[in-house]
Image (cartoon, rainbow, N blue to C red):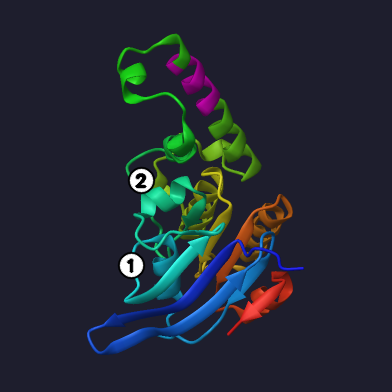
Amino acid sequence: MYTLALLELRNISKLFGKLAALDGIDLEIQGGQLTGIAGPNGSGKTTLFNVVSGFYRPTKGDVIFEGKKLTRLRPDQRAARGVIRTFQSNVLYKEATVLENMVRAHSLHIATNSWQAFFATPAYRKEEKALLTRAEESLDSWGFADSADLVASELAHGDQRRLGVALAAAMNPKLLLIDEPIGGMSGEERATVVRHIKQLNEQGISIMLVEHHVETLLAVCDRLIV
């Protein structure tokens, strides 16, 4: 019996001038999978993530998610449909506090509109309170409760990377693309992040994980693509 793939890449190519970063990629990701993507520097792993998440438009081919083409959608439109990614660099609101970062992550799926926010309607105030509660609960579950009032840029490198994954997870993803989450971390920090990634997958989030630390990929992934 045929099962519809959560994500399907059909003949994806991405050219930068005459350089083919991706060339005829066909790939299916099933719902619930934790899929590892491995390969040397320059092999196109991050480019693949950029194409799936909409930061690059493919030169050729289609990105299909839950049976619908996303190829022409912007990154924010794909995020609203549940395709969320992290970055190799620590992409955070660096001048905002850790808590403010988390509130912004949770606000992707708010129901009230800008007019309700402007007039501070009862519905907006209720949702704002619930948003703050969810953000605080997320920080607690990721071990950031004591750092909530710190400016994000003051966190250690490993904590910034971990917060980046926490923010992506807070956006209610169906498919989470995690790009090298444990780079530059100590063994204990790596173990903490890997544990959280496994928990997210156990909660039903499908994950594509790019990582140079092959032992980590072999330890946690259902499937490994090289």
**What residue range appears in magenta?**
124-132
The residue drawn where x is 61% and y is 45% is: 142
Identify which residue is drawn at 32% across, 24% down: 114
Residue closer to the observer: 132 or 84? 84
Work out whether residue 95 or residue 202 is closer to the camera in this orientation and state it: 202
Badge 1 element: loop
Q: Is residue 52 above or below residue 106?
A: below
Label whose residue precedes the other's in the sequence (2 or 1): 1
Q: Residue furthest bottom?
A: 18
Residue 107 drawn at (x, y percent): 45, 34
| Residue at the farthest front position | 1
Instruction: Residue 226 in the image: state x and y as whole percent.
Output: 58, 85
Residues 111 and 46: in front is: 111
Q: Is residue 111 above or below residue 223?
A: above
Q: What is the quadrant of residue 8 in the picture?
A: bottom right
Q: Residues within 10 Å of mark 2 (few under 14, many from 20)?
A: some
The kind of secondary structure element at disc 2 is loop
Q: Residues within 10 Å of mark 1 (few under 14, many from 20)?
A: some
Front-lying residue, 3 or 158: 3
**Residue that numbered label 2 is attached to:** 93
Residue under circle 1? Answer: 56
Identify the image quadrant of residue 80. top left
Q: Amino acid at mark 2?
A: Tyr
170 is within the stretch colored magenta: no
Q: CA distance from mark 2 to mark 1?
A: 22 Å
Q: Label the magenta part by its dominant secondary structure.
A: helix
**Could you tell whether 3 is left or right of 142 in the image?**
right
Task: Give the percent coordinates (x, y) of residue 118.
Answer: 30, 17
Percent position (x, y) of residue 46? 43, 73
